[in-house]
C-alpha cells in the first residue's frame, strides 16, 4: 500500500494555525513523524489565498526536505501551482492533482513527461463529477488518452475515482467499487487512490466508516491512499487487509510493521 | 564479522535471498561446509528458542527455515562426501485418525533444521506404517508422532505400543500435539515430549545424543 501522508495541510486547523504563525518546528515535526511512520509521500498543501500560495508551498517543501528524504506530494487545487512547486523538490514525488477539468492536464503532463514524477488524477471533468460508473470510466478513457500522448506510463498514475459521501449516496460505494475494478482490469499497473476519510462526512463515528471503506476499496483495487500515517488503527487494518488479500507473503510485512510499533498494543 | 557468523545471523532473521550468497562467500573464505551447516543449525536453535519463548511468530520461523534450506542447497555438493554431518534419520507423522498436519510440519521443519534427515509420512498413519518406515529407512534414530485431538490420543498410545512390541530398536520416540502432556508421554512410554516445534528440535538432539 502506498501511503500519502496528509497532515501538512493548511485546511487541518492545527496545521493551518502553524502555517499562519510560520511555526517551522511544527511543520518539521509533522514531516519527521509521518516519515518515521512509513509514509511513502509527504503531502504539502498550503490552503492559503492564491497570492501567497506558491511561496507558502515553497516554505513547506523546504522544511520537509530539511528533515526527511521521503518524496513530496505537491498538493494544490491549482495545476499551475503544482507545476511550479515541482521545481522546489529535490527528488521526484507526486502531483496532487490533475483532472480532466480545464487545461490542468496540459499544464502538468508536459512538465512531468520526461521525469520520474507520479501524478494523482481525479475522474471528473468540466461537467463535474459524473454520477454513473460508465460516465466516470469515460472520463478515465479520455485521461488515459492524454497520458499516452505525453508518454506517461500507467504505473505513474494514481487514479482517484472520487468517492462520494455515504450520507447522501443512494447506492453506497458501489459506483466507485465498479470503477476501481474496471480501471485495474484495464491497466493492472495503474494505482488506484483516494482519501480514506471523505466517504464519512456528516455521519457519526466516522472512523468506523472510514475503516470499512478502506477494506472494501482495497479488495476492489485501492493500492494508494491519502491518510494520517499515525492513525494506528487504520494502519493496522491496512496491513491486515494486505495479508488477507494474499499480498503479504507469510505475513512478514504485517509482523514487521507490528514490531516497528505501527499498530497493535505498545509494550510498556 | 566472519562470513560464517553472518550466515548464522541472516538465517535467524530469515533472509532467503541473502543466505545462499553468504554461504558461497563463506566457502570461498575457506570455511568448511560442515561448519557452515553447524552455523545455520545454531541459528535455527536461536529461532526455535525464540519461538518457544513466544518472541517470534510462526511465519518468522518458517522463513528462517526457508533461508536455511536455501543455504543448504549451496552447501549440498560440498557435503555429499561427508555423511557424518547428519544426526540420523527421523520418521515423523500424525497418528491414525488424525489429519492435522500444520503443527507436525513445523516440527518436521525444525527437527530437519537441527540436522536430521526427515522421512515425513504425512497424516493419518497407522502403527504399521511407522514400523515399516523404521525398517525401510537407513539409520533411523528418532520417531516423532503427533496427535492434535483428544479423540486421537488413544491412537498415539497404540502407535507407541506397536513400535515397542515390534522389537525394533536403536531409536527414540518423541510425541507431541495440543492435548499431549509430559505426563501422558510418560504413561505411554515415549522417550520425550515437546510442547512446540522449537522445543521438539532441542529434545530430539538431546535424546538421540543420550
Image (cartoon, coloured by chain):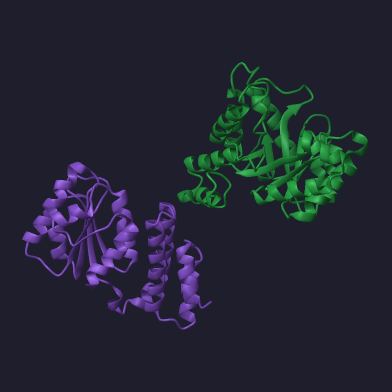
- Quarter holding the N terminus of chain A is top right
Residue that appears at 55% across and 47% down: A266
Q: Is residue B17 above or below residue B196?
A: below
Whole-percent x, y for residue A74 in the image: 78, 43
Left or right of residue A52, residue A264 in this image:
left
Whole-percent x, y for residue B60 in the image: 44, 56
Left or right of residue A223, residue B169 in this image:
left
Whole-percent x, y for residue A208 in the image: 57, 29
Q: In this view, which residue lies farthest toward the right?
A: A51
The quadrant in which residue A154 appears is: top right
Q: Identify the hue of chain A.
A: green
Foreground residue among A127 and B110 = B110
Q: In this view, which residue lies farthest toward the front?
A: A268
The number of callouts visible is 0
Foreground residue among A181 and A142 = A181
Decide if residue B141 is in sight here: yes
Q: Identify the hue of chain B.
A: purple
Q: Is residue A134 above or below residue B198?
A: above
Left or right of residue A22, residue B179 in this image:
left
Left or right of residue B1, residue B94 in this image:
left
Decide if residue A46 is in sight here: no
Whole-percent x, y for residue A11 in the image: 79, 33
Foreground residue among B167 and B20 = B167
Amino acid at each position: 500500500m502506498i501511503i500519502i501522508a496528509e497532515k501538512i495541510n493548511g485546511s487541518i486547523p492545527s496545521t493551518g494555525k502553524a502555517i499562519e504563525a510560520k511555526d517551522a518546528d511544527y511543520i518539521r515535526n509533522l514531516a519527521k513523524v509521518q516519515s518515521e511512520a512509513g509514509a511513502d509521500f509527504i503531502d504539502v498543501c498550503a490552503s492559503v489565498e492564491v497570492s501567497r500560495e506558491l511561496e507558502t508551498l515553497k516554505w513547506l517543501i523546504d522544511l520537509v526536505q530539511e528533515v526527511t528524504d521521503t518524496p513530496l506530494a505537491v498538493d494544490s487545487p491549482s495545476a499551475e501551482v503544482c507545476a511550479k512547486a515541482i521545481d522546489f523538490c529535490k527528488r521526484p514525488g507526486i502531483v496532487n492533482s490533475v483532472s480532466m477539468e480545464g487545461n490542468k492536464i496540459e499544464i502538468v503532463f508536459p512538465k512531468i513527461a520526461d521525469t520520474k514524477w507520479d501524478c494523482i488524477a481525479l475522474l471528473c471533468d468540466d461537467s463535474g463529477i459524473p454520477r454513473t460508473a460508465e460516465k466516470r470510466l469515460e472520463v478515465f478513457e479520455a485521461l488515459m488518452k492524454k497520458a499516452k500522448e505525453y508518454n506517461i506510463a500507467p504505473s505513474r498514475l494514481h487514479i482517484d475515482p472520487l468517492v462520494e459521501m455515504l450520507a447522501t449516496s443512494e447506492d453506497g460505494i458501489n459506483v466507485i467499487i465498479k470503477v476501481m475494478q474496471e480501471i485495474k482490469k484495464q491497466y493492472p499497473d495503474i494505482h488506484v487512490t483516494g482519501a480514506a476519510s471523505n466517504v464519512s462526512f456528516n455521519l457519526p463515528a466516522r472512523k468506523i466508516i472510514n475503516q470499512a471503506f478502506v477494506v472494501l476499496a482495497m479488495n476492489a483495487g485501492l493500492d494508494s491512499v491519502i491518510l494520517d500515517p499515525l492513525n494506528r488503527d487504520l494502519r493496522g487494518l491496512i496491513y491486515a487487509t494486505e495479508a488477507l488479500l494474499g499480498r503479504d507473503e507469510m505475513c512478514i510485512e504485517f509482523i514487521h510493521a507490528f514490531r516497528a510499533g505501527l499498530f497493535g498494543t505498545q509494550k510498556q | 564479522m566472519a562470513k560464517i557468523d553472518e550466515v548464522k545471523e541472516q538465517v535467524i532473521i530469515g533472509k532467503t535471498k541473502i543466505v545462499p550468497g553468504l554461504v558461497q562467500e563463506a566457502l570461498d573464505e575457506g570455511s568448511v561446509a560442515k561448519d557452515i551447516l553447524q552455523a545455520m543449525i545454531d541459528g535455527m536453535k536461536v529461532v526455535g528458542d525464540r519461538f518457544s519463548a513466544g518472541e517470534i511468530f510462526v511465519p518468522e520461523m518458517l522463513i528462517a527455515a526457508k533461508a536455511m534450506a536455501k543455504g543448504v542447497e549451496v552447501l549440498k555438493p560440498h557435503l555429499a562426501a561427508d555423511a557424518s554431518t547428519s544426526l540420523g534419520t527421523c520418521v515423523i507423522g500424525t497418528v491414525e485418525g488424525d489429519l492435522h498436519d500444520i503443527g507436525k510440519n513445523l516440527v518436521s521443519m525444525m527437527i530437519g533444521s537441527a540436522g536430521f534427515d526427515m522421512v515425513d509420512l504425512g497424516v493419518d498413519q497407522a502403527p504399521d506404517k511407522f514400523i515399516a518406515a523404521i525398517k525401510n529407512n537407513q539409520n533411523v534414530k528418532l520417531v516423532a508422532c503427533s496427535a492434535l485431538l483428544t479423540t486421537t490420543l488413544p491412537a498415539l498410545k497404540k502407535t507407541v505400543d506397536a513400535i515397542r512390541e515390534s522389537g525394533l530398536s536403536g531409536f527414540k520416540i518423541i510425541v507431541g500435539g495440543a492435548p499431549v502432556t509430559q505426563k501422558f508421554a510418560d504413561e505411554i512410554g515415549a522417550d520425550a515430549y515437546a510442547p512446540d516445534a522449537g522445543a521438539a528440535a532441542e529434545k530430539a538432539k538431546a535424546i538421540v545424543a543420550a
